[in-house]
Image: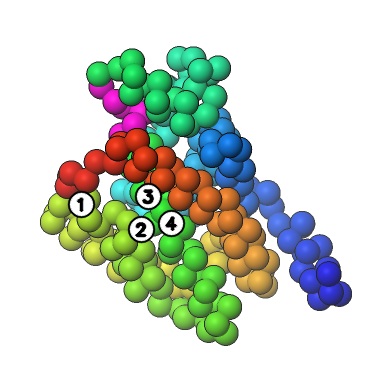
Amino acid sequence: MSSSDSIVHEKVCTVKSDNKVQFPEIVDDKINTEEFLQASRDVVHILDKFGKLFAPVRYDMQKNINKLAIRYSTDKKSNLTLQDMILLEKSTEKDLVAVDALMWLRRALHMILLFFERIIEDHKAGNATEDLVAFLRKAYKETLEPYHGWMTQQLFNLLSRMTPTRSQLLLALADGEVGKEEITLYNMELSLINLKKNVLTLKTFYDDHNLEITTVV
């Protein structure tokens, strides 16, 4: 580790922990349910910082987190991992509430992942694009838009105009502390590593078990 890397690492360790999101490690292609739900709640908490922009997505995420939490609480041992919980529900229940909730939660998390990934990529390319509307719209187009009806798509396009600038977003993530841009971006990149692994693992799991529903809502 270079001296400059050491300085960055030391600074990162001083950032408030409530701005860090840690999704669980994948173990034997499975994801710990409780850890995943807590990380998802942490994402919702971060989205609160951006006001009305993510309000509909935040509402849906919280609703689906609650559904999964209820299902998990019925038998924590049997529902220890998301995969175990989903397969158990599929084999024992007629109404697949958790299956549907996890599918939509994963899609929302995927959109957020792509949005923040583009901010990181832009930064690494030596840019500092202030207008993030295009980043958000592209992330939406690749994740949620195929499953949304015309009215929902129009609502999102309207709300996307409220996307904060890059400076505003990074300042919000730093809880208003100026001069934290590099640290914030570093923490953001770290948080995305396991989020991406979780999203891709769940997508593969749903495809392998024919659980993905492509109905437009």
In three-dimensional space, the C-alpha distance between marks 1 and 4, rounded to whole angstroms, equals: 16 Å
Q: Which mark is residue 14?
A: none
Residue 48 visible in the shown view = no
In three-dimensional space, the C-alpha distance between marks 3 and 4, rounded to whole angstroms, equals: 6 Å
Query: In the image, what residue type sits under mark 4?
Result: Ile
Q: Are marks 2 and 4 in contact (CB under 8 Å)?
A: no
Q: Position of residue 210 (x, y in %)?
A: 30, 37
Q: Position of residue 164 (x, y in %)?
A: 42, 68
Binning the other alpha carbons within 10 Å of mark 4 as few (below 14), some (14 to 19) or many (20 upward) gives many
Q: Secondary structure at mark 2?
A: loop
Q: Please give the residue where the numbered disc 4 appears in the rendered image.
A: 112
In terms of sequence position, does the residue under pointer 2 or pointer 4 come before the other?
A: 2
Query: In the image, what residue type sits under mark 1?
Result: His
At 23% across and 64% down in the image, what residue appears?
158
The C terminus, quarter of image: top left
**Extreme residue in the front direction:** 208
Horizontal side, residue 139 vs residue 48: left or right: left
In three-dimensional space, the C-alpha distance between marks 3 and 1, rounded to whole angstroms, equals: 12 Å
Q: Please give the residue where the numbered disc 1 appears in the rendered image.
A: 148
Q: Are marks 3 and 2 in contact (CB under 8 Å)?
A: no
